[in-house]
Amino acid sequence: MTELFPADQIPPAGRTPSAFVPLAERVRPVQLGDFIGQAHLVGEGKPLRVMIETDSLASMILWGPPGVGKTTLAKLVAAHTKAAFHQLSAVDAGVKDVRGVIAQAEKARRIQKTPTILFIDEIHRFNKAQQDALLHSVEEGVITLIGATTENPSFEVIPPLLSRCRVYVLEALGADDLNRILDHALRTDPLLSRRTIIVEDRELLMLLSGGDARKLLNGLETALRLTKPESNGSVRIRKASIEAAFQRKTTLYDKGGEQHYDIISAFIKSIRGSDPDAAVYWMARMLDGGEDPKFLARRMIVLASEDIGNADPQALVLATSCFTAVDYIGMPEARIVLSQTAAYLSAAPKSNASYLAVEKAWADVRTKPDLPVPLHLRNAPTKLMEDLGYARDYRYSHDYDGHFVEQQYLPDALKDAIYYDPSEMGQERTLRDRLRALWKKRQR
């Protein structure tokens, strides 16, 4: 457990109490014991704590949402290690910068026998060429790499580099950790600790922070500026100041990253699971986060066939019309059309029989040789083809009772295959009953 500094502690050397330095930077931990959160990584006996304390780091990727301690952990490594420490930001660094650090690292290892740690913030912004430049140096131990990313490294870090790094997942901070960080700031910051500051609605502050310590501290700092001190000099931060500081709850959704994949998955699975309330909620999250409404419409077209199919053929019609309407009218009105469609698809009967049918057929197409079309199904536009038996004995279905006549349509090797097996859901029950009656005729 992290112990809080006494209120009268002198700021660490090098720390400035200047109000121009953001609060989040002023109270950033400089000792491992002051780090709050991520107990599964930095608690007693946990991997990162052991590596930092023993100065025996391996190359790693720190993956987690903003404001959970990735950069702070890297700075703690810098403070505790005997290795040379270099920091680059992937936003403005290029291959030349990487090669410069590698050259220094090779020299330090050869002459001074000193290892080198390279911390790259937002490593997901490095392209393939930039990541390739790191590969051999990491593999040969010239540098120990620490990469920080908010994006899923499975998608953003090249596999050869990822395989040479350990991935540590940092979690969004819970209310307990955020409260401790808030107390820490109020008691230890060289500026705030001089004043009596009372936060009335901590629960709201935690909610609007969304598990992000930096957002918490920035919001606190802004709320302080919006709050007039009381007659005795104390500051009481009320709900109105907190709401004004944040303006609104910022939706946690990155339409190009991990949140994109997680929330679209929740959206699709909610519709498949016949829960319109959850479907509309996840849809609203995505739209509020800036997702392209046509992307949602396209996904619902796929779902209408894959998960509903002939149980309710109207679902595909509605989903296709939804895309057209969204394309015509755009946001914000498109949200209404999307909501109508998501609600209908959620409430519709479900069947994946059409999806399973094509998957089974596809498997046979890929695993079996190219089977010939039965002669009676082939066209015979020439006399030679007629003489060879093309189209011979083909029977025209509409000439028979019920517009059906028994004949073989699949190749001989697959003549007994059944790919489409309708469910008992919705209109597919009618199709099932008809097909089963026809199957019985074929058997007779």
Image (cartoon, helix red, strand yellow):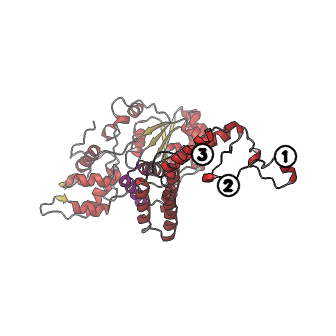
Q: Of discs 3 and 2, which sits in the foreground?
A: 2
| Quarter of the picture holding the N terminus | top left
CB-based contact (under 8 Å), mark 1 and mark 3: no
Task: Give the dominant element type of the magenta stretch: helix, strand or loop.
Answer: helix
Residue 134 visible at all = no
Residue 260 visible at all = yes
Dot 3 amino acid type: Val
Q: Residues within 10 Å of mark 3 (few under 14, many from 20)?
A: few
Secondary element under disc 2, as helix, strand or loop, is helix
Q: Which residue is mark 2?
A: 399
Q: Which residues are magenta?
A: 270-289
Q: CA distance from mark 3 to mark 2?
A: 30 Å
Q: CA distance from mark 1 to mark 3?
A: 32 Å
Residue 31 location in percent, x, y?
A: 33, 39
Residue 260 location in percent, x, y?
A: 46, 52
Q: CA distance from mark 2 to mark 1?
A: 25 Å
Q: Identify the mark nearer the N-term, 1 or 3.
A: 3
The residue most toward the front is: 401
Q: Which residue is mark 3?
A: 358
24 displayed left or right of 390: left
Q: Which residue is mark 1?
A: 388
Q: Identify the mark nearer the N-term, 3 or 2.
A: 3
Residue 130 location in percent, x, y?
A: 59, 47
Q: Residue at x 21, y 55 (%)?
A: 201
| Quarter of the picture holding the C terminus | top right
